[in-house]
Amino acid sequence: MPHAVGVIETLGFPAILAAADAMVKAGKVTLVWFDKAESGRFVVAIRGPVSEVKTGHAAGVEAVDKVFGGKVITHYIVPNPPENVVTVLPLDYTEAVERFR
């Protein structure tokens, strides 16, 4: 079954926390990556079946809008990314997140 990657970048930590929480609750997805970007921006990435990532991703974007001062900077879904992209970028399932799949 093809897996997708969904990424959301927000302004502020409360917004990314709300997005991550909403994504994993809305779809059967795994949070595979989180990082701080620059100037108070945060990025989170999820993986899972394409339909589940679409559902979770939409919930995450919607959740950011409910956070006071929260702002989605950018977001994107990549259905069935090539193996080399997943291996090079920090988007693969790791041992730390494997139990949440």
Image (spheres, rainbow, N blue to C red):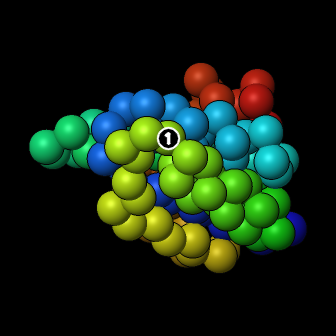
Q: Position of residue 28 (x, y in %)?
A: 83, 47
| Residue holding disc 1 | 67
Picture quarter containing residue 58?
Answer: bottom right
- Can residue 61 be seen in the rendering of this structure? yes
Q: Does the rendering let one see residue 92?
A: no
Give the residue furthest to the front.
68
Q: Secondary structure at mark 1?
A: loop
- Picture coordinates of residue 67, whole percent (x, y): 49, 41
Name which residue type carries label 1: Val
Which of 2 and 7 lies nearest the eye of the viewer? 7
Identify the residue shown where x is 65% and y is 35%. Answer: 21
Name which quarter of the figure residue 99 lies in. top right
Q: Position of residue 39 (x, y in %)?
A: 13, 43
The residue at the point 66 percent across, 74 percent down is 80
* Residue 29 at x, y percent in the picture: 75, 47
In the image, residue 17 above or below residue 81 = above
Q: Is residue 98 left or right of residue 11?
A: right
Residue name at image x 43 percent, y 31 percent:
14
